[in-house]
Amino acid sequence: MTQVVKFYQTGTFTVGNRLLDPDQRSVQASIARDNSLTSGHRACQGCGEALGARYAVDAAMRATKGQLIAANATGCLEVFSTPYPETSWKLPWRHSLFGNAASVGSGIAAALAVKARKAGLEHSAVRVIAQGGDGGTTDIGFGCLSGMFERNDDVLYICYDNEGYMNTGVQRSSATPPAARTATTVPLGPNPGAEFGKGKNVPLIAVAHEIPYVATATVADLRDLEAKVEKAMSMRGARYLQVFVPCPLGWGAASCDTIKLARLARETGIFPVFEAEAGEITAVSKIRHRVPVEDYLRLQKRYAHLFGSHPRPDIVAQLQAMADKNIKRFNLLEEEA
């Protein structure tokens, strides 16, 4: 007998958990999840970083059976989750300076390794993650992060990428995309917003270090994000995960569009989703329904100057060319049958 299953959720490729075997269901679908970042924090409505942190840390907690310590850089995630004397974290959590979360994570991992050796063990059962925003990762913390990679320290570093210093008033970071307006980019003139030709692609820099594992993910694909965290926690050595987390306040977007924006970033090619091991790209998330970059840009006020009374189709075309380059570089399009 054939059973007709109705899907009421549209616009996604989500498979309902009830159709999957229990071991295939997402961490967030389980009532046994850790809720590592629990209720009561002060994140803005629709905050992509709060979602990303909860998804990633809960997945890491499941992978380590709760044996996890986190080092956290100063930034939005730290500020909204730990207003003194309160905390929303339900695991051992260490606040570091803005730029040294990777080093603090490395120190914790080194201490655990010494304890394990003294106990006659090859490795500690307790694992370490370090996390921060793109400002604390790609800018202020870049040297510490590169050092962690070079030493191959046993830490998973998670960067929650919202493309700017959102905690301190929406300033440009080296992850801010071209043409996006921030508090510190050119407000007027022929080319307002962040300049083309500047910035860092830290996932590819991490790949160049040839560390055991590098991946990108978005908050729009929960299963992909969880799977990558669990894979990273199954490995030893330095690992890096960059999660695309839209910021409604900093981007001038509706709080209800956080997941939509993250999905569009992938489906346009603006944010390529891939995995790499030991310096080689091993997997990419293909674009199933390619959409023009303009569909992504129009949802954000930081790009409003491109579509106002004096539209800039030339700049939109440049951004489209960047997406096209990503699609070609990572071979992101599904092959037509």
Image (cartoon, rainbow, N blue to C red):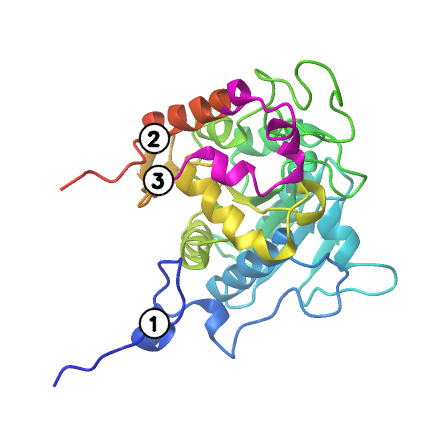
Residue position for label 1:
7
Q: Are marks 2 and 3 in contact (CB under 8 Å)?
A: no
Residue 293 horizontal side relative to residue 102, left or right? left
Residue 295 horizontal side relative to residue 164, left or right? left
Q: Could you tell me how far apart the alpha carbons at marks 2 and 3 are, in whole angstroms?
A: 14 Å
Q: Quadrant of the N terminus?
A: bottom left
Q: Could you tell me how far apart the alpha carbons at marks 3 and 1 are, in whole angstroms?
A: 23 Å
Residue position for label 3:
290
Q: Please report the bounds of the magenta region as a residue range.
A: 290-316
What residue is shown at x 69% (from left), y 59% (from top)?
Answer: 45
Q: Is residue 254 magenta?
A: no
Report helix, strand or loop for mark 3: loop
Q: Is residue 252 above or below residue 46?
A: above
Query: What amino acid is found at the position of numbered circle 3 in the picture?
Result: Arg
Disc 3: CA contacts within 10 A as few (<14), some (14-19) or many (>=20): some
Query: What amino acid is found at the position of numbered circle 1 in the picture?
Result: Phe
Residue 69 in percent (x, y) is at 63, 57
Judging depth in this view, the residue of 127 and 202 nearest the camera is: 202
Q: Nearer the viewer, mark 2 or mark 3?
A: 3
Judging depth in this view, the residue of 249 and 189 nearest the camera is: 189
Instruction: Spot the residue most to the bottom.
Output: 1
Residue 111 horizontal side relative to residue 273, left or right? right
Report helix, strand or loop for mark 2: helix
Residue 199 in percent (x, y) is at 60, 22
Report helix, strand or loop for mark 1: loop
Mark nearer the N terminus (3 vs 1): 1
Q: Is residue 291 magenta?
A: yes
Instruction: Spot the residue most to the front.
Output: 309
Disc marking residue 330:
2
